[in-house]
Image: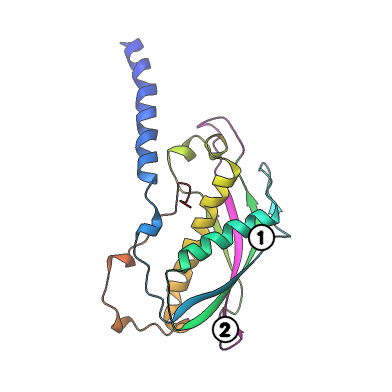
């Protein structure tokens, strides 16, 4: 009896991780874009020269963060075709990219800390008085259960964090859309897009 249970435990663990991985495969971009009034993305500036690496962590160059975040932001916000241009100013404050550890016992997930600003092109002014600091984590999946340092490359970790950062910025804009983007809730019929969307937990498709 004991031996049979010992055999089944690894099988159940593998099966559970497979289910988590399958659930994680859904791309958050499959959900409809939430209404953002007159918003249309202009340019995106990402600064990462002074990003603090929090050990233990893999190291990433400023240029790598700039590329990952710009790609994720442009991918997410290119869906909006409003009548006015708005620009993003993003600063990477710090990060930790999980290194290989002991599965389950010490399975760290990666984290990214950014500060975000939104600029109105026509008004030549920043919409938010103070930069909005956000802490971004990797989503839970079969990969992160055992530590993404074991299951993902550095580039994959950065892609997931960048995608989650873009989703978090989108939620921030939605929270302020009436004040910033002239959004009229009465002009929009309620849609399923209003429901919260989970963080990305798998690498983002090209």
Q: Position of residue 112 (x, y in %)?
A: 59, 54
55 left or right, relative to 148: right
Residue 171 sits inside the magenta stretch = no
Q: Nearer the observer, disc 2 or disc 1?
A: 2
Along the viewing direction, whichever of 180 and 102 lies nearer the viewer = 180
51 left or right, relative to 69: right
Mark 2 or mark 1: name the one nearer the start of the chain: 1
**At 47% across and 51% down in the image, what residue appears?**
204
Q: Residue furthest front?
A: 206
Q: Position of residue 90 (x, y in %)?
A: 61, 67
Position above or below: 98 against 163: above
Q: Which residues are magenta?
A: 99-127
Q: Determine which residue is flagged by label 1.
A: 93
**At 60% across and 44% down in the image, what residue appears?**
154
- Colour scheme used in the picture? rainbow
Instruction: Tell me where residue 16 sits by quadrant.
Output: top left
Quick check: marks 2 and 1 in contact, CB under 8 Å? Answer: no
**At 39% across and 53% down in the image, what residue appears?**
27
Q: Determine which residue is flagged by label 2.
A: 121
Residue 120 sits inside the magenta stretch = yes
Q: Residue furthest right?
A: 50
Instruction: Tell me if mark 2 has few (under 14), some (14-19) or many (20+) residues whose alpha carbon lies within 10 angstroms of its own.
Output: some
Instruction: Tell me if mark 1 has few (under 14), some (14-19) or many (20+) residues whose alpha carbon lies within 10 angstroms of its own.
Output: some
Q: Position of residue 41 (x, y in %)?
A: 51, 74
Tell me the SS state at disc 2: loop
Query: Number of numbered discs present?
Result: 2
Q: Using the numbered discs, state the Cα–Cα distance from disc 2 to disc 1 in whole angstroms.
A: 25 Å
**At 39% across and 34% down in the image, what residue appears?**
17
Q: Position of residue 105 (x, y in %)?
A: 53, 31
Numbered label attached to residue 85? none
Tell me the SS state at disc 1: strand
Position above or below: 60 against 78: above
């Amino acid at each position: 009896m004991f031996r049979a249970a010992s055999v089944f435990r690894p099988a159940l663990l593998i099966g559970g991780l497979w289910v988590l991985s399958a659930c994680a495969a859904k791309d958050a971009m499959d959900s409809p874009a939430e209404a953002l009034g007159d918003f249309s993305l202009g340019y995106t500036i990402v600064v990462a020269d002074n990003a603090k690496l929090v050990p233990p962590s893999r190291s990433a160059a400023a240029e790598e963060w700039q590329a990952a975040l710009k790609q994720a932001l442009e991918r997410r916000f290119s869906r909006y075709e409003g009548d006015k241009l708005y620009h993003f100013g993003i600063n990477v404050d710090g990060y930790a990219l999980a290194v290989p550890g002991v599965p389950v016992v010490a399975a760290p997930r990666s984290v990214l800390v950014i500060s975000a600003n939104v600029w109105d092109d026509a008004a030549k002014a920043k919409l938010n008085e103070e930069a909005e600091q956000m802490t971004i984590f990797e989503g839970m999946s079969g990969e992160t259960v055992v530590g993404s340092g074991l299951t993902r490359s550095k580039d994959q970790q950065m892609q997931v964090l960048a995608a989650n950062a873009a989703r978090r910025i989108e939620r921030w804009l939605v929270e302020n859309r009436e004040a910033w983007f002239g959004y009229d809730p009465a002009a929009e019929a309620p849609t399923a897009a209003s429901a919260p969307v989970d963080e990305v937990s798998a690498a983002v498709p090209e």
